[in-house]
Each structure stands twice: as C-alpha cells, then as structure tokens.
Amino acid sequence: MNTPIETERLLLKELDAEDLLFIIELLNSPGWLKYIGDRGVKTTEEGMEYLKNGPWKSYEENGFGLYKATLKDLGTPIGLCGLLKRESLKHPDLGFAFLPEYMGKGYAFEASKKVLEFSRESLNITIFQAITLPDNMLSIRLLKKLGFLYLSPFRFLEGEELHLFQLILKENP
C-alpha cells in the first residue's frame, strides 16, 4: 500500500525508517508491554531490526502489515493498526496499539474499521481473526464493536491463554 488510507481524522500508511523513534516509544508504552509483551526494542538498532523483520517483511511477503496511524491535522504518529500473518492462525490477524494519550478517543475503532474495509476491497480478504488477553477489556470491547465474535481459547505453544475472535465480511459485489 503506497497510498495512505484516509479516515476522518487519520492517515494510515506503511512504516518507514523515519518512524524509528515512534516505534521505540510505542513498543515500550505501558499498554504494549502489558497486553502485547516486551519485544526487547530499546535502542535504535533494535528498533531497526524490528521494522526489518516485522512490518517491512510483512509488507513484502504478505502485501499487508501494521500501518502507522497519524493524526491528519497535525501529522503526529499515535499508533499502529493493520493485519498480521501468523503461522498458527488460519486467517489474517487484526492488530492495533496506540500511545496511552490517544486511547479511549475512538482512534483504534476508526483505524481498524478502515483497515478491514481496505483489506476486503483491495486485498479480497473476507475472514479476519484477532487475539487478545482475556483481561484486555478495551480490545475485547473494540473487537465486538467491529463485529468480531469470540471463537475459543487460544494458545501460542507454551504461552498464556488468549481469546480468539473472528469476523467474516461479505464479499465485494
């Protein structure tokens, strides 16, 4: 996706090298550490490795990935939203994370809704999954608001138990 996806208040676009400091800040924010986990990204070198082996690799291999959510009016990066391809999931996984000061303002819903629409219309993806910790009530509430339904408990190998959600969208006419 070279052209940014636009919502009422946000621009969603692929991450680039200029986003390095933002990525380090987001990946070390309290919500990320609590609900997603420590990715060991503390330095610019580790941040660059994360970008290379995560989002950039996903764009190249899958045609999608996590997109930077930026406030349209100020150009401020506030979070990530997009799709992840996980070996252990049959369908693309909707992921989102926002800096603490931008949570609870509807940005995650706005970004997620647009990512789902874009993915259906431009990538022909109609089935989406999402995983979350059972106590992450903000994410669970958002997934339900987007139309996701709880499927089952889920575990990555020896990891802690997560909740697996799924959404099926109608195909394009």
Image (cartoon, rainbow, N blue to C red):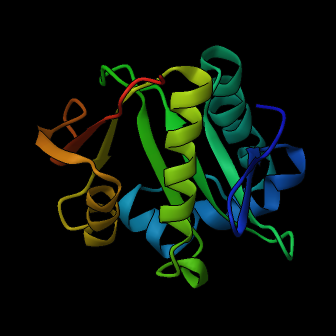
Q: Position of residue 144 (x, y in %)?
A: 26, 58
Q: Quadrant of residue 169?
A: top left
Name the outermost residue toward the right. Answer: 18
Residue furthest to the top:
61
Q: Quadrant of residue 82?
A: top right
Q: Is residue 44 above or below residue 98?
A: above
Q: Position of residue 72 (x, y in %)?
A: 81, 68
Could you say which is closer to the camera, residue 115 or residue 45?
A: 115
Image vertical order of residue 171 relative to residue 159, above or below = above
Q: Nearer the viewer, residue 166 or 157?
A: 166
Query: Disc count in the image?
Result: 0
| Residue furthest out toward the left | 152
Confirm whether residue 119 shows in the render: yes
Q: Determine whether 34 is above or below 48 in the image.
A: below
Q: Nearer the viewer, residue 4 or 50?
A: 4
Residue depicted at 52% across the width and 60% down the height: 97
Residue 171 in the image: x percent, y percent?
A: 41, 23
Query: Where the N terminus falls, by quadrant?
Result: top right
> Residue 163: in sight, yes or no?
no
* Picture layout, residue 164 above or below residue 105: above
**Residue positioned 57% across, 49% down in the render:** 114
* Camera-side residue of 101 and 125: 125
Residue situated furthest bottom in the rendering: 101
* Residue 107 percent across, percent down from the top left: 56, 69
At horizontal 51% and vertical 30% (from top left) the residue drawn is 120
